[in-house]
Amino acid sequence: MSVLKVIEVLGNSTVSFEDAVQNVVNEASKSVKNIKSVYIKEMQVKVSANKISEYRVNSKVCFGILDE
């Protein structure tokens, strides 16, 4: 039987939503091992001078609890 844990992580990027999600995975993987999936809870953009200046995601990162 496997046990999973979920943490909420906010990410951002000036490039795209996909890049913001990749940033979440990159940063979370520095302290969390065995990431299984990422669920995107919310997507937002910051607008400056009528142009998108930043993409933001509110995500849930799901990872397995490692047996020792």
Image: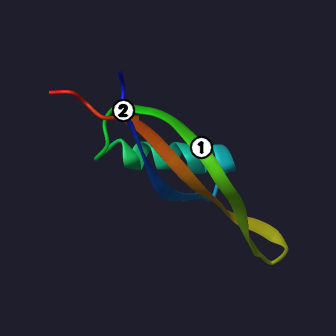
> Regarding mark 1 in the picture, which secondary structure is present there?
strand
Question: Residue at the spot x=70%, y=57% of the render?
Answer: 43
Classify mark 2: helix, strand or loop.
loop
Question: Could you tell me the amino acid type at mark 2?
Answer: Val
Instruction: Verify CB contact (< 8 Å) between mark 1 and mark 2.
Output: no
- Reading the image, the residue beneath label 2 is 3
Count of numbered labels shown in the rendering:
2
Residue 61, percent from left and from top: 48, 45
User: Furthest-top residue in view?
Assistant: 1
Color style of the picture: rainbow
Q: Position of residue 28 (x, y in %)?
A: 39, 47
**In the image, residue 26 above or below residue 56:** above
Residue type beneath disc 1: Tyr
Instruction: Return the residue found at the far front.
Output: 1
Observer-nearest of 15 and 41 = 41
x, y (%) of residue 34?
35, 31
Q: Percent position (x, y) of residue 13? A: 59, 57
Nearer to the camera, 51 or 68: 68
Is residue 52 positioned above or below 59 on the image? below
> The N terminus is located in which quarter?
top left
- Residue placed under numbered mark 1 in the picture: 39
Q: Residues within 10 Å of mark 1 (few under 14, many from 20)?
A: some
Mark 1 or 2: in front is 2
Q: Is residue 51 left or right of residue 60?
A: right
Q: Residue at x 30, y 34 (%)?
A: 65
Q: Is residue 8 left or right of residue 39?
A: left
Residue 54 position by quadrant: bottom right
